[in-house]
Image: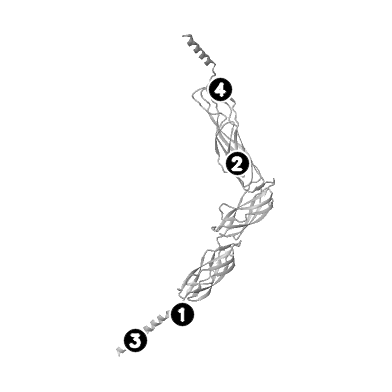
């Protein structure tokens, strides 16, 4: 071999001898180290709807890292929490958790992730500290590839871990309202009236500069007109009464509808806060209605007369300053179709009088005349009832009755004459 060929080969061999050996980083020992805490505040109030955000942290560390000449990479680290699942429970506490357990995937180290849980603090929650258990489940690589010889075959072993991390929440003192009584006045469909609420502070805080407010609950038929009453001091176990004006939807039915009650106050730390909403049911009556209870008024053909119509309030509230109207049509006429009835309590009856005429050609029979009642509700708003009927009867006049009998009399007389003539003719033939 020539010298100019041997020298390059020797140089190449020398370079290969001094190049570092290629290898894979491998880890031996170690495991995930999982801790958790509540992000933000952990203080809540009775009746509060909240989101509890939990931060999960992995701070696991490997015992040894080294590099070997193997060609197979290590797929997972022993410190990675794989298929991490967390769930929060409030069993045995006044905290109701409404979110199911959550799958958070893989959490490497160092690393952190978070999970949110919807929660409802019960209205009767008492002051104190409560522990909510956070259940944590995951798997991790419990044997290291560093323990395996360089090979084309990899046999990882994963071990499951289940653990519980206690999280602490604090129920803080607040004003909490309980509605002891709800009295109504004049509440019927389509009207306005009053609600008188008697409320008690059953919480653990003394409120100052307090105002009690009522709110429409969703699409409830009760709509507040005056929605806030200032009550000043609202100490623990204190009782106050609040009067509100409300309106009722025209399409309301006779049933109980909800309203929401809340108190805005200054707490013992000087902050302005609003209590949890308390929902209370309020009864509503049907729209005020009336009926005619008197028998049909009687008019004679071709005459005018004053008829009497008795009205009854069949509703559950008083019709204030009521007026009745009677609508006439042919064969009737009237220039006096209004009658003042005054105040009509539930079940009350009042008689109205109308001057009315019946045409001489009116056919005998009973006619339903339309009538309605206009009245004032509890807040002096003008209301009007649905239209109903008042029956009026037309009777034959005496002259018409006498004329109608003439053809009958004439017929009888003709029959008598014919009979007498026939009898005379027969007797003559016999002679």
Taking depth in this image into account, of 182 and 6 the one nearest to the observer is 6
Label 4, secondary structure: give it. Answer: strand
Marks 1 & 3, CB-CB < 8 Å contact: no
Q: Are marks 4 and 3 in contact (CB under 8 Å)?
A: no
Q: Is residue 316 visible?
A: no
Residue 431 in percent (x, y) is at 30, 90
* Mark 3 residue crowding within 10 angstroms, few (<14) / some (14–19) / many (20+): few
Give the image quarter of residue 336: bottom right
Which residue matches tag 4?
67
Residue that sits furthest to the front in the current view: 4
What is the spatial separation of the Cα atoms under label 1 and label 2, in whole angstroms? 94 Å
* Residue at 52%, 13% in the rendered image: 11
Q: Quadrant of residue 58?
A: top right
Mark 4, residues whose alpha carbon is within 10 Å: few (<14), some, or many (≥20)?
few
Residue at 50% in and 13% down:
8
Residues at marks 1 and 2 touching, judged by CB atoms closer than 8 Å: no
Q: Are marks 1 and 4 in contact (CB under 8 Å)?
A: no
The span from disc 4 to disc 3 (Cα, nearest Å) is: 154 Å
- Which label sits on residue 34? none
Name the residue that disc number 1 marks.
Answer: 399
> Residue 52: which numbered mark, if any?
2
- Any mark on residue 421, and which? 3
User: Closer to the N terminus: mark 2 or mark 3?
Assistant: 2
Is residue 86 visible to the viewer in this orientation of the structure? yes
Q: Residue furthest bottom?
A: 431
- The residue depicted at 50 percent of the width and 11 percent of the height is 7
């Amino acid at each position: 071999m020539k010298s100019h060929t041997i020298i390059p080969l020797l140089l190449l061999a020398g370079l290969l001898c001094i190049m570092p050996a290629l290898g894979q980083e491998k880890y031996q020992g170690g495991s995930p180290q999982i801790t958790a805490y509540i992000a933000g505040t952990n203080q809540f109030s009775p009746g509060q709807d909240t989101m509890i955000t939990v931060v999960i942290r992995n701070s696991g560390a490997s015992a040894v890292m080294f590099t070997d000449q193997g060609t197979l990479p290590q797929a997972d680290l022993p410190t990675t929490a794989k298929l991490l699942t967390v769930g929060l429970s409030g069993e045995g506490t006044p905290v109701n958790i409404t979110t199911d357990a959550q799958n958070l995937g893989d959490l490497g180290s160092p690393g952190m992730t978070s999970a949110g849980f919807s929660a409802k603090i019960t209205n009767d929650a008492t002051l104190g500290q409560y522990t909510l258990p956070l259940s944590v489940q995951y798997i991790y690589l419990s044997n290291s590839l560093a323990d395996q010889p360089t090979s084309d075959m990899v046999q990882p072993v994963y071990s499951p871990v289940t653990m519980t991390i206690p999280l602490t929440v604090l129920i803080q003192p607040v004003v909490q309202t309980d509605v002891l009584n709800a009295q109504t006045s004049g509440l019927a469909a389509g009207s306005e009236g009053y609600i008188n609420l008697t409320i008690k502070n059953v919480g653990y805080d003394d409120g100052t500069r307090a105002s009690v407010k009522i709110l429409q609950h969703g699409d409830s038929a009760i709509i507040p007109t005056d929605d806030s009453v200032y009550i000043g001091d609202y100490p623990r176990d204190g009782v106050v009464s609040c009067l509100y004006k409300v309106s009722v939807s025209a399409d309301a039915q006779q049933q109980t509808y909800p309203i929401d009650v809340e108190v805005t106050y200054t707490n013992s730390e000087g902050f302005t806060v609003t209590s949890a909403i308390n929902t209370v049911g309020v009864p509503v009556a049907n729209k005020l209605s009336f009926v005619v209870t008197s028998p049909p008024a009687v008019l004679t053909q071709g005459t005018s007369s004053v008829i009497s119509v008795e009205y009854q309030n069949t509703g559950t509230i008083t019709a204030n300053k009521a007026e009745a109207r009677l609508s006439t049509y042919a064969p009737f006429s009237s220039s006096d179709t209004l009658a003042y009835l005054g105040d009509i309590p539930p079940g009350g009856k009042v008689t109205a009088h109308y001057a009315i005429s019946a045409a001489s050609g009116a056919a005998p029979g009973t006619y339903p005349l339309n009538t309605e009642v206009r009245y004032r509700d509890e807040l002096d708003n003008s209301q009007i009832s649905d239209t109903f009927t008042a029956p009026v009867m037309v009777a034959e006049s005496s002259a018409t009755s006498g004329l109608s009998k003439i053809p009958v009399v004439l017929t009888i007389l003709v029959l008598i004459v014919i009979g007498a003539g026939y009898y005379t003719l027969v007797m003559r033939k016999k002679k």
